[in-house]
């Protein structure tokens, strides 16, 4: 494990897959404290799979995941439970419980892991909702919220136990550009003002350009990391055609005569 104490997460030699199928091979990278770290790549490249291994949801076939100098792969019992409580997770759907109001959704981790009295738990939930701009929606049901508000509520719940690390899976999925931009601003503010470290899976290029300090790009063919660095550096100076296509939102080479004609016309216009 890397002994640099500025590194919060260290992934080393990770191999992931299901049965005989390999999805990721020899994945190694570091996430530094306080940065917004983004995992990108095409569909089916293993972005969400990597995230699920980082949070300990799935065991890797090989390799290690260190969080704050603790190996989540090897951790067991109470040590593992304590480690899992040091970070929050926001899934793509938000995963709010539709049978309870927003405040009670945010209180769930407090009910599970603390002995606080009910009024104290409610005050914590309200403070987290205020942090994400949803204090006036505390007693509304999830079905009454827009998609963007549901994502914010899920972030508030992930913050309930005051973690310094948050994992987000496709936070802007299904959101309109204005709502997505508002979520980007929230992530940036939480990072800058509270020092929260983010690990975010996304394919939203405008969002990446705004929020990311550092990124890795996964490749479905090699099943490994094909590029790593600051978004601006990769966007402006990468010599890898796949990286340029990603940031320029260019299609793959055509597979049909119709595609060839369309691709040629697009290149002429550009």
Image: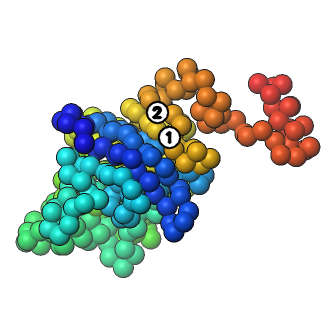
Q: Position of residue 103 (x, y in %)?
A: 26, 67
Circle 2/circle 1 CB separation < 8 Å: yes
Q: Position of residue 121 (x, y in %)?
A: 14, 66
Query: Is 116 placed left or right of 226 in the picture?
Result: left
Q: Which mark is residue 228?
A: 2
Tag shown at residue 225: 1
Is residue 85 among what the camera can see? Answer: no
**Residue 87 occupies which quadrant of the picture?**
bottom left
Q: Residue at x 59, y 32 (%)?
A: 243
Left/right of residue 173 with respect to residue 154 in the rendered view: right
Residue drawn at 51 percent across, 69 percent down: 19
Residue 50 spot, x, y in % from top left: 44, 53
Q: Quadrant of residue 254?
A: top right
The residue depicted at 52 percent of the width and 26 percent of the height is 234
- Which circle, 2 or 1, is nearer the viewer? 1
Near-viewer residue (155 or 139): 155
Q: Quadrant of the N terminus?
A: top left
Front in this rendered view, residue 175 or 77: 77
Residue sitting at the far bottom: 99
């Amino acid at each position: 494990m890397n002994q640099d104490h500025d590194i919060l997460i260290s992934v080393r030699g990770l191999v992931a897959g299901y049965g005989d199928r390999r999805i990721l091979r020899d994945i190694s990278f570091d996430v530094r404290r306080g940065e917004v770290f983004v995992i990108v790549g095409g569909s089916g490249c293993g972005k969400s799979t990597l995230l699920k291994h980082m949070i300990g949801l799935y065991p890797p076939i090989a390799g290690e995941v260190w969080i704050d100098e603790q190996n989540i792969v090897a951790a067991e019992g109470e040590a593992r439970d304590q480690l899992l409580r040091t970070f929050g997770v926001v899934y793509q759907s938000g995963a709010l419980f539709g049978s309870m109001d927003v405040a009670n959704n945010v209180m769930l981790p407090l009910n599970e892991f603390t002995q606080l009295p009910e009024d104290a738990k409610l005050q914590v939930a309200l403070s987290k909702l205020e942090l994400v701009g949803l204090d006036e929606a505390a007693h509304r049901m999830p079905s009454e919220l827009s998609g963007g508000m549901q994502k914010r509520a899920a972030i508030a719940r992930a913050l309930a136990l005051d973690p310094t690390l948050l994992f987000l899976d496709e936070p802007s999925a299904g959101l309109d550009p204005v709502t997505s931009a508002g979520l980007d601003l929230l992530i940036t503010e939480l990072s800058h003002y509270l020092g929260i470290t983010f690990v975010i899976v996304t394919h939203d290029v405008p969002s990446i350009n705004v929020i990311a300090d550092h990124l890795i790009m996964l490749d479905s063919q090699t099943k490994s990391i094909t590029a790593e660095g600051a978004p601006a550096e990769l966007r402006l100076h990468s010599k890898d055609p796949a990286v340029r296509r990603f940031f320029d939102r260019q299609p793959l080479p055509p597979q049909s005569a119709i595609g060839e004609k369309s691709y040629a016309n697009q290149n002429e216009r550009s």
